[in-house]
């Protein structure tokens, strides 16, 4: 059974004023069965000159829970290419 954690982040400026909080989702993974680390749920951002992965920000805990329930728990494929043959047309040679 997979387990996901929701992490709250909030920035405070120089005057101590808080920004709007945002939330990330992560799971705990193990490397060689010894070292535990956080694996954040990411999205790929495409730019003109490059692309990179960034954590997905959620505006509320409810939205993060909904993402976990609807996408991660049912293990819906993310960031994969799905191919299927729709139709085959045969030509008659003369």
Image (cartoon, rainbow, N blue to C red):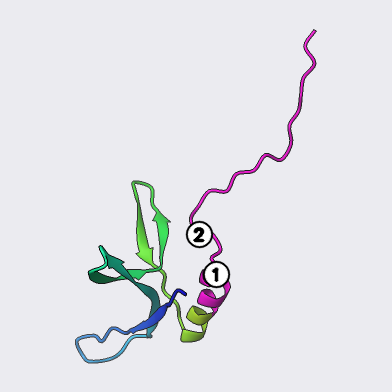
Q: Which residue is mark 2?
A: 78
- Mark 2, other Cα within 10 Å: few <14 / some 14–19 / many ≥20: few
Residue at 25% over, 63% down = 32
Q: Are marks 1 and 2 in contact (CB under 8 Å)?
A: yes
- Secondary element type, mark 2: loop
Observer-nearest residue: 86 or 19?
A: 86
Mark positioned earlier in the residue sequence (1 or 2): 1
Q: Main secondary structure of the magenta part?
A: loop
Q: Is residue 5 left or right of residue 70?
A: left
Q: Which residue is mark 1?
A: 71
As displayed, is residue 78 above or below residue 25? above
Q: Residue furthest top?
A: 94
For the C terminus, which image quadrant? top right
Observer-nearest residue: 2 or 25?
A: 2
Residue at 55% over, 69% down = 71
Part of the protein shown in magenta: 66-94
Magenta span has 1? no
Percent position (x, y) of residue 3? 43, 77
Q: Quadrant of residue 36?
A: bottom left
Residue at 76% over, 24% down = 90
Magenta span has 77? yes
- Mark 1, other Cα within 10 Å: few <14 / some 14–19 / many ≥20: few
- Secondary element type, mark 1: helix
Percent position (x, y) of residue 43? 42, 62
């Amino acid at each position: 059974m997979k387990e996901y954690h929701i992490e709250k982040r909030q920035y405070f400026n120089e005057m101590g004023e808080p920004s709007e909080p945002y939330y990330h989702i992560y799971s705990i993974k193990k490397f060689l069965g010894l070292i535990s680390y956080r694996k954040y749920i990411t999205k790929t951002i495409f730019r003109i000159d490059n692309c990179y992965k960034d954590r997905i920000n959620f505006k509320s805990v409810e939205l993060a829970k909904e993402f976990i329930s609807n996408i991660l728990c049912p293990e819906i494929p993310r960031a994969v290419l799905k191919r299927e043959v729709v139709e085959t047309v045969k030509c008659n040679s003369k």
